[in-house]
Image (cartoon, rainbow, N blue to C red):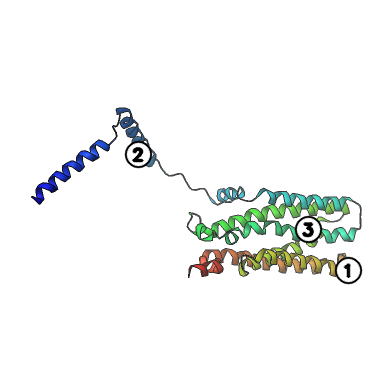
């Protein structure tokens, strides 16, 4: 008796589900078949070739906020106004160094975006990885910052009727120091406090430059160019080291790249 009831229940359930099933038109079946054929053809297509290093760097430019370029252009414009205003030449020489150092701060949010927005783990899961993304950002921002500093140097040299090499030394030393110090700070400090520490570092560099120009009257004299060149070379070596350390830390993994974020998962 139990088997008869079970068989009858199966029949009734089958009739119930059959009555609930919507009728499918031949057009719908044909559309589904066409979609399946199209999807199969799409799956058989060869995968697009991955862009090279230059293409990847260029692709990262669109992720840099527009205000970054606007801020760099504003700094160049301010330097051009100061240089062409006919004011104190000594103040103009100090200004080109301070604005060059300030130019570094414009790129800090972009370089620090992975840690600040806590997306470093997501970048590690992408095809290119966090290290490639970091290197691409550094290249893009480095080129734009170098262009901005170069324009400021050219404007200052033209306005002061001075050698561009001399102006470049006065601009590059604070620029290199600010770059290297900011990269070290972003690498070691906590993500929430690192940007403000970079601002403080650049401000300290600017104040030190102002103080030295006031205490050392011959700071921008021809006799001091050798000291500027040696200091700039040392700062450049430090900057190269910090760039290598930043990329190497990103390559090492999340625990090394963002230890403050990694602790939240342990």
Q: According to the image, label 1 marks what residue? A: 214
Tell me whether circle 2 and circle 1 mark residues in contact (CB < 8 Å): no
- Residue at 81% across / 58% down in the picture? 96
Residue 99 place in picture, x, y as percent: 78, 58
Q: Residue at x 32, y 30 (%)?
A: 30
Residue 102 appears in the rendering = yes
Spatial separation of the CA atoms under disc 2 and disc 1: 74 Å
* Distance (Cα) linking label 3 and label 1: 18 Å
Task: Give percent across and percent down for residue 62.
Answer: 61, 47
Mark 3 lies on residue: 99
Q: Is residue 46 above or below residue 176?
A: above
> Would you place residue 81 above or below residue 25 in this image?
below
Could you tell whether 197 is left or right of 28 in the image?
A: right
Q: Residue furthest right?
A: 87
**Residue under label 2:** 40
- Name the residue rendered at 84%, 56% in the picture: 163
Q: Earlier in the sequence, mark 3 or mark 1?
A: 3
State which mark lies toward you, 2 or 1.
Answer: 2
Q: Secondary structure at mark 3?
A: helix
């Amino acid at each position: 008796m139990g088997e008869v009831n079970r068989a009858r229940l199966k029949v009734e359930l089958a009739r119930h589900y059959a009555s609930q099933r919507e009728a499918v038109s031949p057009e719908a079946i044909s559309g589904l078949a066409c979609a399946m054929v199209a999807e199969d053809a799409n799956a058989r297509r060869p995968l697009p070739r991955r862009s090279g290093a230059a293409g990847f760097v260029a692709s990262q430019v669109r992720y840099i906020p527009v205000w970054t370029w606007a801020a760099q252009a504003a700094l160049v414009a301010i330097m051009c106004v100061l240089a062409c205003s006919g004011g104190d030449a000594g103040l103009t020489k100090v200004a080109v160094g301070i604005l060059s150092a300030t130019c570094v701060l414009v790129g800090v949010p972009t370089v620090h975006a992975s840690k600040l927005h806590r997306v470093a783990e997501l970048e590690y899961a992408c095809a290119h990885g966090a290290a490639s993304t970091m290197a691409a950002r550094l290249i893009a921002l480095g080129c734009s910052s170098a262009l901005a500093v170069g324009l400021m140097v050219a404007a200052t040299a033209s306005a002061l009727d001075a050698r561009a090499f001399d102006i470049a030394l006065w601009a590059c030393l604070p620029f290199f120091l600010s770059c290297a110090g900011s990269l070290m700070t972003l690498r070691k400090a906590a993500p929430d406090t690192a940007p403000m520490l970079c601002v403080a570092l650049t401000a300290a560099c600017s104040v030190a430059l102002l103080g030295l120009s006031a205490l050392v009257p011959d700071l921008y004299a021809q006799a001091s160019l050798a000291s500027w060149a040696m200091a700039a070379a040392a700062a450049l070596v430090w900057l190269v080291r910090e760039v290598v350390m930043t990329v190497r830390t990103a390559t090492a993994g999340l625990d090394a790249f963002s230890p403050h974020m990694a602790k939240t998962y342990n």
